[in-house]
Image: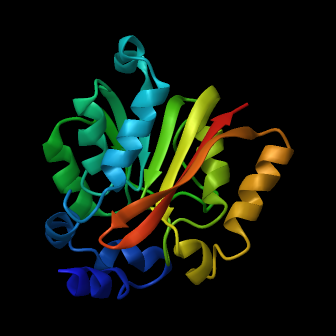
Amino acid sequence: MTTTLHTYMHTRQRGAHTCQVYTAAKYTQLMNSRTYAGPRVAAEEIARLVPQECRKDARVLDVAAGTGKVGQELYKRGFTWLDAVEPSTGMLEILYKTEVYSQAFKEFLGHGNSTIPTETYDVVVNVGGMGEGHIPVRGVDDMINLTKPGGVVVVVMRLEYLEIVKEYRDRLETRMNLLEKSGRWSMVLKKTIPRYFCDKEGIIFIYRVI
């Protein structure tokens, strides 16, 4: 299974064509809870930040939502006001069937043409949306803009992508740090995730928007 997943995750095209090479059914089959810890880890960390009594009123945006795995994990933990951003029609068809999302935006982030209202969400979470040909570095600016002051941005990704993805190498964390120095957000958490995806380590960043 590891070989199949590794091959699958490294045979995607770049840019706007990325959403076309994902087969939603294949994605659902391969990215299950036994091989992919991202959705669960993100939901657990968000639940630690938001008290139980506040979760039903917390507005959450799931960026690069795929087939809705993050939303389902959050819903289990009492978050019921969930929106999604996902550019793939096939993914959205499966996501809608989860019945945990209020609405979905079919678009990319990081290209300067988002239709999503700004300063709207208490939590903006992106699990697995950072990768080769995926959300560009400037996507983190969009995530900040979509978050209410005092809300949090959560980014979960494979640790090695910080080095092996050219778009992120010496740029993604540099941008995150610059945004912190300029007063856009402040770091809440940064930690590695063992066995995030098969045998690969992950990393989670959590920032509070100022």
Residue at the (60%, 67%) spot, across then down: 136
Q: Is residue 118 visible?
A: no
Please count the marks in the image.
Answer: 0
Depth check, front residue: 124 or 145: 124
Residue at the (22%, 35%) spot, across then down: 100
On the picture, is 56 further left or further right than 111?
left
Depth check, front residue: 179 or 100: 179
Rendering quarter of residue 101? top left
On the picture, is 201 further left or further right than 170?
left
- Which corner quadrant holds the C terminus? top right
Q: Is residue 2 above or below residue 116?
A: below
Q: Is residue 160 above or below residue 114?
A: below
Residue 186 location (% of width, % of height): 72, 38
Residue at the (53%, 74%) spot, across then down: 161
Q: Is residue 55 above or below residue 192?
A: above
Residue at the (24%, 87%) spot, across then down: 3
Rendering quarter of residue 13? bottom left
Residue 6 location (% of width, % of height): 31, 83
Rendering quarter of residue 196? bottom left
In the rendered view, how is the structure colored?
rainbow
Q: Is residue 95 above or below residue 118?
A: below
In the current view of this chain or complex, which residue is farthest to the front?
194
Residue 23 location (% of width, % of height): 21, 73
- Which corner quadrant holds the N terminus? bottom left
In the current view of this chain or complex, which residue is farthest to the right?
182
